[in-house]
Image: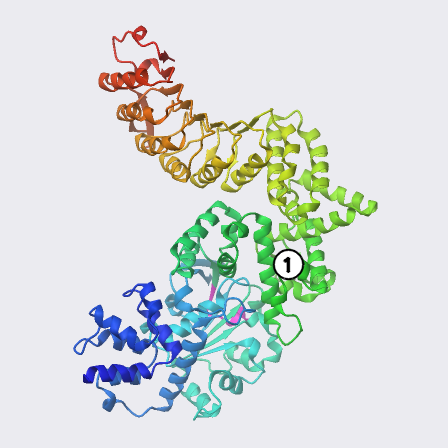
Amino acid sequence: MDPFRVKLLSISNGITDREFVELKFMCKQHIPVGVLERLKRPLELFDELENRNLLNAENKEFLAAILCGINRLELRDDLLDQASERKVSSPLNTFQESLCDLYKNVIGWLQPLAWNKSFHIHIKHIYTNLQMITETHQGRTIKKEPLNSYVEVFQQRSPFTKQKRILIEGQAGVGKSTFLSLIVYDWACGNPNLQQFKLILFMELKQMKGNLKSDLFEFLFPRDFPYSADYLFQYISANQEDVLLILDGYDEVNPVQLKDIEDLIMGKIFRNCTVIVTSRPGKGARVHWFMDSRIEITGFTSENIHEFVLKYFQDDVPMAESLIAQLEMHPVAENIARIPLTAMLICAMWEEMPQAALLSSMTTLFTELTLLLVKRYYARQSGQNSIDPGDISTLEDIPDDLFQSLLSLGEISLNGLLNDQLLFDVQELERKCTYKGVLDIGFLSKELGASRLKPVEKCRFSHRSYQEFLAALWLSNKIKHAFTDRSVFDFVSVYIMNCLSSGLNSVLFLFTPGLLGDAFPPVLELLLQEGAAEVEEDVSLAQLFFEVCILALYESNQGQLAYKLGSQMPPGVAALHHLNATPYKVRALVFFLLNVQTVKSLLIEHSQVGKQALQVLARFLPEMVSVQEVNLQSNMITDGNLIAFTKSLSHVPHLERLSLANNCITDHGLGFLISAFKDLPNLEHLDLHGNKLSDAGFGLVAPALSLLPKLKELRLGCPVVSGTEEMPQGIGEERSSPKVLSETVFNSLMEAVHSHATLQEVSLDTKALPLGLDCLMFDRLKIS
């Protein structure tokens, strides 16, 4: 056999299954994922590298590099015929090799769902840059600057201080531990930006028992390690500049019980080592004085979220894109996904749940997030209780002691919303919520009060929507009891009226109906009875009330109640003006229209209707069989928005009237609309006047009329010429000027109109007519 082939076979036999997974991961830039998934042995991977000219007897560099990447230096040396040159391993090499093995094969694999021990993701597969801000004290002021990468964490920012003690703060779930895992993994893989450290020692403080020396050795090195803890400490003491100590989770321990850790942070031992400490805000205040630098991790930006989702689903790009599209349609969902833990949970749920179910409503999303946070809490408490997180699949499955405390927290949440209270006293919450763990689940973030003399520990909800959801959890629970207890009914009615007067629409019209579900009908009766009378004489308030009612209907999934809202609008017409047409609101409107089946005309005007909202409308339009007219005039619809609408549109035989008048559509968008004419076989009236169509755009209409065999009326208005005119302040402003149609386009348009079997009238602006034209010659032409 070829000697090179023999060597590859020998190397293949020395690679473990986990190392093989890492090797394939490092080849993703060169070999398609589908091909990699079919490879079962390292030797098959080597064959694929040979097929792609990345490996042969004279070209071993790529394989050598990835073998180095999995810390198999002896295999790399064997490949390069350098085994004889290797030196006898020194004590430092032995420490490094053991740590590298731990960081790459254990720390490098994340377990995002603590209760699911079979679900692991490689850190390089998923890690996405976090938004980081460094705080530097300059006298009595604090200067905040963004950081681009963790490399800048270790850079000196002042000529007078060295970066020896670094505090990294961030709310629960914001990605502090994952950030540290990336640092140690990159060091283990030989990242040149970290090679100033000969040793990096990573500790979770909650695992420590109190003796730094024995704890470090017990948790980082195997039992049969050839060197002692004393030897390690001697090395650290003699080489402090070369050692980085990472202490994760200062907020999760009682510092008094970890005297060595306090001494390390304060510089009483290993003063010249670099030490990183992580903590939630407020908890780290105890050690602020000893820190050379404080860095805050604030989570993901919108771009980070999209990058994270694409990385999570890198083997299934369509699934990633569908989730990103859904997040864009749910601004609240995208907002809470700025917390990396929440983004991870949403991705994990998106894999397991039917896509329509997870983000179908805000209540569904926050219910699932709550269940996952509860599961995560119990998984982290394993050994301290007998609760199996796998047994929790609904809110009713939450153990009663915790659930009752969640209800107590919900009552506090609602009173806080009614009184515009954002900060809560931790001791007060602990007094009212008998199950102390409720404060550590992930709904709340802790901080110190503003007083410097007597700082009191405070907390706030990590996102307002969590506060609203818990408030609704308590309110819906009380409403269910009110059905059988009149005294509770009177008590709850007061809260409902207070929510109405305070404008707590998310509590009253989103989460509460969603949590009530089948128990929602009598509540809707009460809302209609009380609310309709309040808005009867105010048109704008009446529309707002109608909007929140359809949201409540959608969240509760009680489509059979749609007819009750019919009295809130003119017969057969759903007319909405100055609507904040978010995709979520359009979804709710669609749900109402699908269930009421009496609306023939849908009018949305003088609103801002974005791309995602139009996509939702187009997607469900074929199912809204009663709707014969869609009027979207004066909504600032652009080409991009219209293109999204037409691409999502399918066969709509029941649509007879379509108005896109007075928008921002140009010839480009018109071309896509024409391509959708085939899906509108029974369209009788089309209104495009007041857009930005040119003479050439009008020319596109003439041959397209045959695609609308039942068209009776067409409104086109006047072509325009667009340009920019410099304003006095130097600001460019777009303008559109009327333009006369060319005779060629006008004649082709009139010819197409008169040859059309059903078209009775085409409307043009008087300014569009060619000079000297006798209008009486064209009996189907209407001048406006």
Rendered view: 4 above or below 354:
below
Q: Is residue 204 left or right of residue 190?
A: right
Rendered view: 671 above or below 743:
below
Looking at the rendering, in which quadrant would you find the C terminus? top left
Residue 747 image position (x, y, % from top left): 25, 16
Residue 32 image position (x, y, % from top left): 30, 63
Q: Nearer the viewer, residue 277 or 625?
A: 625
Identify the residue at horizontal 53%, vertical 63% (top origin).
173
Identify the residue at horizontal 31%, vertical 25% (top origin).
701
Q: Nearer the viewer, residue 734 or 256?
A: 734
Identify the residue at horizontal 40%, vertical 18% (top origin).
713
* The image quarter in which residue 261 lies: bottom right
Residue 191 can be seen, yes or no? yes
Q: Nearer the viewer, residue 697 or 278?
A: 697
Residue 442 can be seen, yes or no? no
Magenta part of the chain: 287-295
In this view, the residue farthest toward the left is: 58
Residue 348 image position (x, y, % from top left): 50, 60
Q: Secondary structure at mark 1?
A: loop
Q: Amino acid at mark 1?
A: Thr
Q: Is residue 171 magenta?
A: no
Q: Is residue 289 magenta?
A: yes
According to the picture, the residue beneath numbered tag 1 turns out to be 394
Q: Residues within 10 Å of mark 1 (few under 14, many from 20)?
A: few
Residue 615 image position (x, y, % from top left): 44, 40
Q: Is residue 441 left or right of residue 179?
A: right
Looking at the rendering, in which quadrant would you find the N terminus? bottom left
Q: Is residue 628 left or right of residue 782?
A: right
